[in-house]
Image (cartoon, helix red, strand yellow):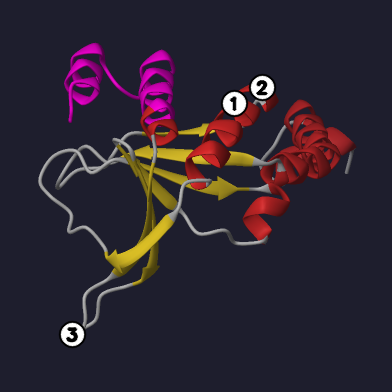
Amino acid sequence: MSKSTESQAHGGTPTMSKLKTLCASLLLLAAPALAGAAEAPGLRITYLVYSGRPNPELTVTDPASLRAIESRLADALAAPAKSGAAAEPVLGYNGILIEHVGGPAAKASPQPLTIKGREVRIDTAPASAFKAATATTRVSAAAGDLEAMLLKLGHKRGALDAKTLDVLLDQP
């Protein structure tokens, strides 16, 4: 049986067989790069604006934006901490959730945190049948600045429309 007859007997043409081999080779070559991209440091930003439907989110991976966010976050976290009961979620806007993804920071498993107004909240224990959820909260102007910056970033990246952005920027 010739090569073309053999390929056709297995349901393909010689061109399709070459194309499949080429695609498989490209995937094998690209696998290390794709794995490295999954390990690249980043921040997942989730805008907690909806009840009953998915919240808009984006992932920040570019170094300049990461540095700007991390710098403002460090300023906000420098404020004195106060532990207590975690705020109960409300209908409507509940802040911006920031989570580390990829890279060494995500592997170190830092706690996700929530920014709302002048507050940065890190949930420390979930609620149970016998006690309320607890959180550590820090209050600072830097937190408010970070929130405004992240809201504008969400609009710039298409996660938030102009009307939603205006409503959220006017929140107390």
Q: Specify start and end residues of the magenta stretch as a single range.
A: 145-172
Based on the displayed image, in which of its 4 quarters is residue 58 positioned?
Answer: top left
**Image point 63% across, 54% down: which residue?**
106
**Can you identify the residue that label 3 sits on?**
129
- Give the residue type at disc 2: Ala
First in sequence, mark 2 or 3: give its number: 2
**Residue 146 in sight in this render:** yes
Is disc 1 in contact with disc 2, using a CB cutoff of under 8 Å? yes
- Give the residue type at disc 1: Ala
Q: Is residue 168 left or right of residue 107?
A: left
Q: Secondary structure at mark 3?
A: loop
Q: CA gap, disc 1 to disc 2?
A: 6 Å
Quadrant location of the C terminus in the rendered image: top left
Q: Position of residue 35 (x, y in %)?
A: 74, 46
Name of the residue lying farthest toward the right: 2
- Give the residue type at disc 3: Ala
**Can you identify the residue that label 1 sits on?**
68
Residue 148, relative to residue 135: is it above or below? above
Q: Is residue 119 left or right of residue 49?
A: right
Q: Secondary structure at mark 2?
A: helix
**Image point 13% across, 39% down: which residue?**
92
Based on the displayed image, in which of its 4 quarters is residue 68 positioned?
Answer: top right
Q: Nearer the viewer, residue 122 or 101?
A: 122
Quadrant location of the N terminus in the rendered image: top right
